[in-house]
Amino acid sequence: MEPVSGNLARLRQEIEAHSIAAGRGKHAVHLVAVSKMQPENRVIEALEAGQRLFGENRVQDALARWTSLKPRWPDIRLHLIGPLQTNKAFDAVALFDCIETIDRPKLVDAVTVAMTKQGRKFPCMIQVNTGHESQKSGTAPEDLPALLHYCSRKTLVISGLMCIPPQDEPPALHFALLKKLADRYGLPELSMGMSMDYAKAIALGATHVRIGSALFGKRHDQ
Ligand SMILES: *Cc1c(COP(=O)(O)O)cnc(C)c1O
C-alpha cells in the first residue's frame, strides 16, 4: 500500500496546480481528508505528514476515533460530511468544527440549541441535493432560499454549499449548479469534488475537496 505521506504530497501539488490553472490563488482550495472507515494507522500517517483537516460521515464513528486522537493533535479540524439526525446534533456540535450537511429547519433548530447550550458557534454549510435524488439527503435547490432565510433567523451562519452528485451523471453539471447557487446567495465556500472528480470541481469553483480513497487507499466498505 502506498504511504499516505506520498499520496498527500502528490494531492497537495495537484490541488495547487488545478487551483492556479483555474486562475485562483495557490491556497484557494482546502483538502478535507475523508478518514471514515480507514484504519487508525493510516489516519495517524496523515496527521504525522501534517494534515489537520478531516472529514467524517458518522457522528458515532467520528467520536470513537477522534476523542482519543484530538488531545495529541489539538489543532485538528473536523468536518461532518454525512447526514445528521437531530438526536445526534448535540454530540456533533461538541466534536465538529463545521457541519457541511445542514438540510432542513428541524436540524437548524437542533444545531442552534446545541450551540447555545455549549456556548460554541461555528459556520456551517448547507447540503444541496442537486440531482433531486429521493434517497439522498440535502435540500432541493428550490428550497434553498427559504432554508437560508431560516438559518439567518436562527443566527446560524452559513459559509457555503456542499453537494454529492448522482453517481451516473457527469458531475460537472452539478458542480456548476452549486457554484451558481452559491454566487446567487453570496456564499463564499463550496464543498464539492471527491477522489475521482476533484480536478473538475476545482475548475468550477470548489473551495473544499473531500478526498478519501485517493489519499488513504480503498476503504473497508469498498
Ligand atoms: C466518502 C465520502 C467522500 C470521499 O470519497 P472518496 O471517493 O473516497 O474520495 C467524500 N464526500 C462524502 C460526503 C463522502 O461520504
Image (cartoon, rainbow, N blue to C red):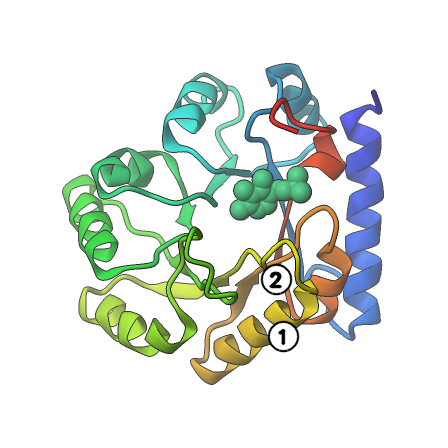
Lateral position of residue 206 relative to residue 114, left or right = right
> Closest to the observer: 7 or 181?
181
Label 1 SS: helix
> Closest to the observer: 71 or 43?
43
Lateral position of residue 88 relative to residue 1, left or right = left
- In the rendered image, which quarter is residue 192 located in? bottom right
Among the two numbered marks 2 and 1 on one chain, the one whose residue lies closer to the N terminus: 1
| Other-residue count near label 2 (Cα within 10 Å), few / some / many at <14 / 14–19 / ≥20 | many
Q: Residue at x 73, y 55 (%)?
A: 197
Residue at which label 1 appears:
176
Q: Quadrant of the C terminus?
A: top right
Say if mark 2 contacts mark 1, CB within 8 Å: no
Residue at which label 2 appears:
207
Q: Quadrant of the N terminus?
A: top right
- In the rendered image, which quarter is residue 5 located in? top right
Lateral position of residue 114 relative to residue 219, left or right = left
Numbered label attached to residue 215: none
Residue type at mark 2: give it.
Thr
Label 2 SS: loop
